[in-house]
Image (cartoon, helix red, strand yellow):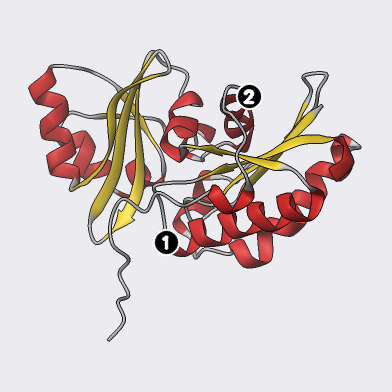
Amino acid sequence: MSLLGFDTSTSATSACVLRGDGEAFETLPSPERLLERPGHAAELMPAVAAVMERAGVGFADLEAIAVGVGPGTFTGLRIGIATARSLATAAGLLVRPVSSPAALAAGVGEPLALALIDARRGELFAALYEHGTRRWAPFAATPADVAERVRTEGINPLAAGDGSVRFREELEVSGVRVAPPDSSSHAVSALQVCRLASAVAGVSPEAVFPNYLRPPDAKPR
């Protein structure tokens, strides 16, 4: 059976079908797209349709739907998770929730990977993974605070993600290594979402919730 996975935790949309035979069909945004305005409402379903057509699979061929649950942008996570719930409910499938920083770190390609997602307000959502195992749970902090934690622990991870792109200068001045500007590792890969989801138990669509980690910017009056 195949997996459909997608992530909308950043400004960019990624989608992938990981077929049962191991072949992957992915749409992965360019690093430049990460710094542009979000377009998930217009991009996500066409991306899903495109990867499913390329993979030659229908919803009846899927084992589950995998989705990145953040932390990340508030609106992006709402769109991605609502879409995963709707598609899974319509197709009678379970959903497999995956940490967006974990998927980001899995695409870095180094033993010690620092996932940095832009949290707005001048902050980052940061998480550290060592050989795929989480070493720092996701937290929100300024780039300076993240760099200070790296220095305090005496480690030398490679940072990637839209947060590292946006705050590259500040991070590098503080001694944090950042992946090259044109590296595909800065995007949260839906292929990695699918791969991580292979080890995640499926849950009912209504049981999937975003990990906002922080209250939304907009509050009711």
Q: Secondary structure at mark 1?
A: helix
Q: Secondary structure at mark 2?
A: loop
Left or right: residue 30 versus residue 1 is left
* In the image, farthest residue toward the bottom: 221
Closer to us: 67 or 41: 67
Residue 44 location, x and y as percent? 67, 57
Mark 1 / mark 2, whichever is N-terminal: 1
Quarter occupied by the N terminus: top right
On screen, residue 120 above or below 144: below
How many neighbours does mark 2 have within 10 angstroms: few (below 14), some (14-19), or many (20 or more)?
A: some
Q: Which residue is mark 2?
A: 198
On screen, residue 118 above or below 60: below
Residue shown at 76%/57% (left/top)? Answer: 46
Q: Amino acid at mark 2?
A: Ser
Closer to us: 78 or 143: 78
On screen, residue 59 above or below 127: below
Task: Give the quadrant of residue 63.
Answer: top right
Left or right: residue 16 versus residue 50 is left
Task: Give the quadrant of residue 193.
Answer: top right
Residue 133 location, x and y as percent? 38, 17
Q: Which residue is mark 1?
A: 74
